[in-house]
Structures are given as structure tokens and as C-alpha cells.
């Protein structure tokens, strides 16, 4: 039977693993939604104007970038997770959990925004090509939400290395 000190020592690595998991899981959920929602808009737009498919694939690419943000942070966090006896304490665990939630939840929000804007945007571009620049600008503002989460996550991550 494990003693109480050993059971308490399992919490810091658990928090780190949750941080890495949340970073990947939530950002991938956002990217998947953004890809699916934008993809349905592209498919319905392509029926009328198939020549615009490659031009209107941008929302799908931007949604995929959100998942890369989560992947980067998850790999960084996973690389630092260690046994508590080797110096992985509660501070590192909580910082890694915060970093993972930061990039994950902002990635989820960005993916939702990209999906909605991408769907409506590509349908609008099919009817009026002058909407393309406006759609791209709105997509950039949606994408930057995920980038903000990445910046905060990297900042939190570097606090554990110092």
C-alpha cells in the first residue's frame, strides 16, 4: 500500500498531463469544427463556382493552424513532465495546466469563429467576389484569438523553466 506522501506526489504530474491533454484536445476540437464548418460552405459554394475552390480554401488552412498551436504547447509541456522526486512540483504542474488551458480554450474559440466566418464568407464570395478581402480580414482577427492563447501559454511555460 502506498503511503500518503507518495499519493500526494502524484498530483503535479497529473496536472502537467492534463495541461498537455487540454492544449491538444481543445485546440483540435476548434480546428475540427472550423474545418468542418468551412468545408461545408466550400462544398456548397463549389456547386455554383468550382473555380473558386482553391481561393476559398483559406479558412480550412487557418483552422488547421489553430491545432498546430495546441500541438506545440502540448509537446513543450510533455517534454518537461517528470517524477516529483526529480523536481516536478505543484508549481510546475499548475503552470502547465494553465498553459494548456490557455492555448486550448483560445484555440477552441478561434476554431469556432473561423468556422462560422469561413462558412458564411465563402458563400458570400461565391455571390460577390469583392467580399474576399473582408472575409480574409475577419478570419485573421478570428485566428489571432488562438495566437493570443499561444503567447500566454508560452509565457506560462517559460516561467517553469527559469
Image: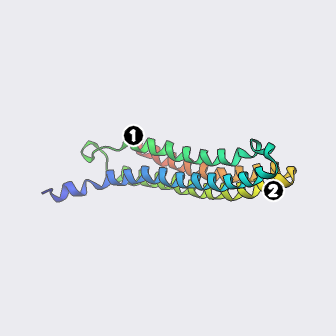
| Of marks 2 and 1, the one in the foreground | 2
Q: Residue at x 44, y 41 (%)?
A: 76
Instruction: Report the disc number at residue 124.
Output: 2
Instruction: Report the disc number at residue 154.
Output: none
Graded by Cα atoms within 10 Å as few (under 14), some (14 to 19) or many (20 or more), the crowding at tag 2 reads some
| Gap between marks 2 and 1 measured at Cα | 44 Å
Q: What x and y, as percent, mark residue 73?
A: 48, 45
Q: Quadrant of residue 8?
A: bottom left
Which residue sits furthest front?
A: 47
Of 86 and 107, nearer the camera is 107
Quarter of the rendering occupied by the N terminus: bottom left
Secondary element type, mark 1: helix
Q: Quadrant of residue 161?
A: top left
Q: Residue at x 52, y 47 (%)?
A: 70
Q: Label 1, on which residue?
A: 79
Of 91 and 25, nearer the camera is 25
Amino acid at each position: 500500500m502506498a503511503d500518503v506522501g507518495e499519493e500526494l506526489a502524484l498530483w503535479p504530474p497529473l496536472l502537467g498531463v492534463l495541461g498537455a491533454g487540454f492544449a491538444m484536445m481543445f485546440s483540435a476540437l476548434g480546428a475540427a469544427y472550423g474545418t468542418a464548418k468551412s468545408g461545408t460552405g466550400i462544398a456548397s459554394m463549389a456547386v455554383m463556382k468550382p473555380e473558386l475552390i482553391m481561393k476559398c480554401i483559406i479558412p480550412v488552412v487557418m483552422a488547421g493552424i489553430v491545432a498546430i498551436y495546441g500541438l506545440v504547447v502540448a509537446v513543450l509541456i510533455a517534454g518537461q513532465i517528470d517524477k516529483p522526486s526529480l523536481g516536478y512540483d505543484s508549481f510546475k504542474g499548475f503552470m502547465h495546466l494553465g498553459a494548456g488551458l490557455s492555448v486550448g480554450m483560445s484555440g477552441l474559440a478561434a476554431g469556432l469563429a473561423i468556422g462560422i466566418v469561413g462558412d458564411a464568407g465563402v458563400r458570400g464570395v461565391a455571390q460577390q467576389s469583392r467580399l474576399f478581402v473582408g472575409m480574409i480580414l475577419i478570419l485573421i482577427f478570428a485566428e489571432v484569438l488562438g495566437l493570443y492563447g499561444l503567447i500566454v501559454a508560452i509565457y506560462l511555460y517559460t516561467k517553469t523553466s527559469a
